[in-house]
Image (tube, rainbow, N blue to C red):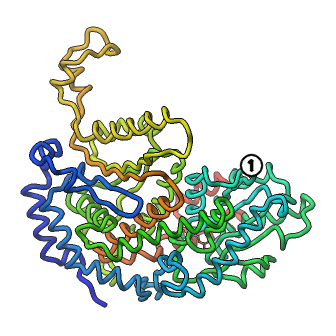
């Protein structure tokens, strides 16, 4: 199937003209003053989520041109090719079918295989959750990247739904400072280790699994088969490691899209079968929205289009994610892999170098904490950084007062970014903490805000398993959208290979001290690491 890349379309040229004429200088304050219907015009409903896109630096004409761009690039056909299981991951010759993992039983591709793993996986999760019978109090997931970040993000996000008698731990880094504090708190007889690795060859995971097994045996653990399970596509390698209880998945599940597969086992153990099914159902609802809603009402598609507008026309290099929900503290890290590993590419699917920018840097922290750290730069720094506010109306705790303050802060930040404050406004205000005698004009310049800084607000009723499932799927499809327009393969990750290979070369050199053929910097650092 051949598709048009964004820069080879008529709409792209039209967008360039539109940007010069109306885009670059668009002022949000004026746009709201001109159009009292702007909030309604740029509000979108999707399963479990409402999105306010009105505080973004675009207008109706921009959106119309972006929708034309999507059509010219064949976004819908590309989406359908993915959903049909075509091998759109061309460099690895693989289909991309994470959506099949959350389709109801009997629907979707590979349903028999999917249900054939899901049913026993959920039964096993329930066995572990019966802590009186299982004796398990601690579950340790050992995995990295996509075999870690999903469960590590979801479990705290759904803390209110987690079994109160279970502690979930996540070990990922090939750094004793990660596993050691976890092991120190464990008792072998009460611990279940999950070795999570799609390939079962990843250095970090294999090394940590080895450390865990040695620790287990040294501490008197005597039943590795009962206390170690694997989640992997490589059942043979798991068996060779000595694990006979394995939950499998398939090469058409990308690592960063795998929390819906057996990799979700820690989530299933934490929240139980019914909630895990709700998580899948929420994601499936968003899949259907992405597949069926016209582009004019399609939230993931519009977020992806806005990303292209910001990256390629406005030239914004990063996007900040600010969840106003402490449970989502790992969401930015999760999204970093999802977006930057997917779309951090400099050639298109045919291997042609790209003449335009791709993935922005994605980063963030929950609010309000971020307000007391990096928000200063968002408000008054020299870069414009679009911010994504994520709000849940009803908390899963009973502290109504805290929730009201949290929501007020989230709303206020979006408002402040957009409205800003002129030097004249600042001049008219009192500033009791300012240095006495400072020229009021100088002070006013320090205390003014440029404003016109864009943001999106995503709002849900409550962060339930279904709402979270929908949110993650929303991001997946949004990343698909921008990747499709850029014409890149969003589903490979060759960029992680070079460092892996070089680490393999350096490891024996660290032991031997052989620096032959190394660049002077690496050689010098290696010698210092050896204490020479
Ligand atoms: O970082 C590269 C990567 O391949 C990711 O895409 C993947 O999620 C991670 O390593 C872990 O791989 P595995 O699940 O095979 O251990």
Instruction: From the top left corner, tell me how far across and down residue 406 is, in percent.
Output: 44, 37
Q: Residue at x 49, y 87 (%)?
A: 109
Left or right, 203 with respect to 326, comes to right
Q: Is residue 441 above or below residue 43?
A: above
Residue 366 position, x and y percent, is 47, 44
Q: According to the image, label 1 marks what residue?
A: 181
Q: Is residue 60 left or right of residue 348?
A: left
Image quadrant in which you'd find residue 270 = bottom right
Residue extending farthest to the top is 437
Residue 315: quarter of image: bottom left
From what the image shows, is residue 373 above or below residue 64? above
Label 1 CB-ligand 1 distance < 8 A: no
Q: Relative to residue 166, is residue 155 drawn left or right? A: left
Q: Quadrant of the N terminus?
A: bottom left
Q: Is 235 left or right of 19, judged from the image as shown?
A: right
Q: Residue furthest bottom?
A: 1
> Which quadrant of the picture is home to ligand 1?
bottom right
Q: Residue at x 44, y 61 (%)?
A: 471
Q: Residues within 10 Å of mark 1 (few under 14, many from 20)?
A: few
Q: In the structure shown, which secondary structural element does the residue marked by tag 1 occupy?
A: helix
x then y, percent, for residue 175? 68, 56
Asked whether residue 204 is in view, the answer is no
Q: Who is closer to the viewer here, 120 or 486?
A: 120
**Viewer-proximal residue among 503 and 280:** 280
Q: Position of residue 500 (x, y in %)?
A: 57, 70
Q: Report the front residue among 397 and 250.
A: 397
Residue for point 37% across, 48% down: 389
Q: Is residue 137 visible?
A: yes
Q: State how many labels appear.
A: 1
């Amino acid at each position: 199937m051949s598709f048009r890349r964004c820069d080879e379309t008529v709409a792209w040229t039209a967008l360039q003209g539109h940007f010069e004429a109306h885009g670059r200088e668009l002022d949000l304050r004026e746009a709201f003053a001109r159009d009292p219907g702007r909030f309604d015009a740029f509000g979108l409903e999707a399963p479990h989520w409402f999105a306010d896109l009105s505080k973004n630096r675009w207008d109706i004409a921009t959106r119309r041109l972006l929708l034309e761009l999507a059509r010219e690039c064949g976004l819908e056909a590309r989406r359908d090719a993915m959903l049909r299981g075509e091998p759109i991951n061309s460099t690895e010759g693989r289909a991309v079918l994470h959506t099949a993992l959350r389709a109801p039983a009997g629907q979707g591709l590979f349903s028999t295989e999917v249900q054939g793993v899901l049913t026993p996986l959920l039964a096993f999760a329930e066995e572990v959750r019966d802590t009186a019978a299982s004796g398990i109090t601690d579950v340790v997931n050992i995995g990295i990247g996509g075999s870690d970040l999903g469960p590590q993000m979801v479990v705290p996000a759904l803390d209110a739904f987690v079994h109160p008698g279970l502690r979930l731990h996540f070990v990922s880094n090939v750094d004793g400072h990660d596993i050691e504090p976890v092991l120190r708190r464990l008792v072998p007889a009460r611990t279940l280790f999950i070795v999570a690795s799609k390939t079962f060859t990843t250095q970090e995971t294999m090394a940590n699994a080895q450390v865990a097994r040695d620790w287990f045996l040294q501490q008197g653990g005597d039943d590795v088969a009962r206390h170690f399970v694997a989640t992997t596509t490589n059942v043979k390698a798991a068996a060779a490691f000595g694990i006979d209880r394995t939950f499998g998945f398939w090469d058409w599940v990308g690592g960063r899209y795998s929390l819906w597969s057996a990799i979700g086992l820690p989530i299933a153990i934490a929240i139980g079968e019914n909630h895990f099914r709700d998580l899948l159902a929420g994601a499936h609802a968003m899949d259907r929205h992405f597949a069926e809603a016209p582009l004019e009402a399609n939230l993931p598609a519009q977020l992806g289009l806005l990303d292209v507008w910001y990256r390629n026309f406005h030239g914004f290099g990063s996007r900040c994610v600010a969840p106003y929900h402490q449970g989502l503290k790992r969401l930015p890290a999760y999204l970093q892999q999802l977006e930057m590993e997917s779309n951090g590419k400099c050639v298109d699917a045919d291997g042609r170098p790209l003449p335009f920018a791709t993935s922005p840097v994605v980063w963030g922290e929950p609010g309000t904490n971020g307000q007391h750290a990096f928000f200063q730069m968002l408000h008054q720094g020299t870069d414009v950084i679009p911010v994504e506010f994520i709000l849940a109306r009803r908390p899963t705790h009973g502290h109504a007062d805290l929730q009201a303050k949290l929501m007020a802060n989230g709303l206020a930040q979006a408002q402040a970014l957009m409205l800003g404050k002129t030097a004249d406004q600042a001049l008219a205000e009192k500033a009791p903490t300012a240095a006495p005698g400072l020229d009021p004009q100088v002070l006013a310049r320090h205390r003014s805000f440029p404003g016109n800084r864009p943001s999106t607000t995503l709002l849900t009723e409550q962060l339930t398993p279904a709402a979270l499932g929908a949110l993650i799927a929303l991001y997946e499809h949004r990343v698909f959208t921008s990747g499709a327009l850029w014409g890149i393969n969003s589903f490979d990750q060759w960029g992680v290979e070079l460092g892996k290979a070089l680490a393999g070369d350096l490891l024996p050199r660290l032991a031997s001290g052989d620096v032959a053929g190394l660049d002077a910097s690496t050689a010098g650092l290696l010698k210092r690491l050896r204490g020479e």
